[in-house]
Amino acid sequence: MPLIPKSHPRAKSLLIREKLVDGFDHGLVAKEGLLAQGRGEAFDYLLGEKTSKASSQAIKAAAAQLLLAERPVISVNGNIAALCPKQIIKLSKQIKAKLEINLFYTNEKRKQAIIRVLKKNGANEILGTKKTSSKKLSGIDSARRIVDKDGIYAADVVVVPLEDGDRTMALRKAGKTVITFDLNPLSRTSQTANITIVDNVTRAIDLLITESKKLSKNDEKNLLKIIEKFDNKKNLSENILQIKNNLTRRAKIA
Ligand code: ATP
Ligand code: MG
């Protein structure tokens, strides 16, 4: 891995890129996954590369929703396995969620590479790996509709970080409550999910773990209140306004 000097003005962003390139070299990340990161980076730049106030509220609502869930599942793809394997496992343990590998570009070799990384980082059970447990979600035409009967198929709440719009819609149609991390507040996934965390998953995942720990001391009534107060459309608007305000400020000083 090439060394990125800490003093480089874009050091953090470059380090995230290196994680993905490394993940690509190790067979975890698809070529298309690198492009998806690029699209995300552009929005991160416009958002100011920090967690907005609105996103902190989405993180709180997501934590409450996950603590209330009966059968929560976290969907893992190549980008997530490359970017934050340790944290995704920590989150799954914190909120007692199952982990399921669900890939946009299905590929057995890549699936095995992801399993290895998750196991290396402490995962116990990983779903989505046995043909015998597969079920089909309706509303998606390709192999992407295959989900695990004990995982996403039976879940009430599903976390789908960096997800495609088609699948998010199919999950909603199947009656699931969907939580996503997506830097693009305009994407179909962002607009379709119940709770959209508009932030870089590498920043927001630690915040979600901390918030889940903090809220775990709350009773059901309080958790429900947090969810009832949350409005995803309004939250997305606030993030879009954040971009607009950042651009206006930059336009003035340019
Ligand atoms: P949609 O299908 O929902 O309309 P899309 O086709 O524009 O979205 P996809 O490639 O399907 O994009 O999904 C990837 C999404 O993940 C993009 O919206 C991208 O902004 C987002 N993304 C990529 N990297 C990150 C990251 N590190 N953190 C958070 N979001 C990210
Ligand atoms: Mg898409």
Image (tube, rainbow, N blue to C red):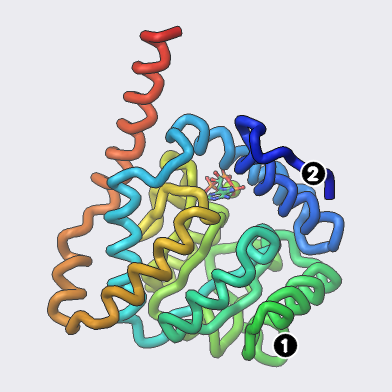
**Sooner in the amino-acid sequence: mark 2 or mark 1:** 2
At mark 1, the secondary structure is loop
Residue at the spot of label 2: 3
Q: Quadrant of the C terminus?
A: top left
Query: Relative to the observer, which residue lies in front, 7 or 23?
Result: 7
Label 2 crowd bin: few (<14), some (14–19), many (20+), radius 10 Å? few
Q: Can I make out residue 133 in this image?
A: yes
Q: Residue at x 61, y 63 (%)?
A: 84
Query: Relative to the observer, which residue lies in front, 46 or 75?
Result: 46
Q: Position of residue 238 (x, y in %)?
A: 28, 39
Q: Amino acid at mark 1?
A: Lys
Residue 85, quarter of picture: bottom right
Mark 2 vs mark 1, CA separation in Å = 39 Å
Do the CB atoms of the residues marked 2 and 1 lie less than 8 Å apart?
Answer: no
Q: Relative to 177, is 229 above or below?
A: above
At mark 2, the secondary structure is loop
Q: Relative to 154, is 76 above or below?
A: above
Residue 25, quarter of picture: bottom right
Q: Position of residue 116 (x, y in %)?
A: 77, 78
Query: Relative to the observer, which residue lies in front, 175 or 9?
Result: 9
Give left or right: position of 30 versus 237.
right
Q: Residue at x 85, y 71 (%)?
A: 109
Residue at the spot of label 1: 130
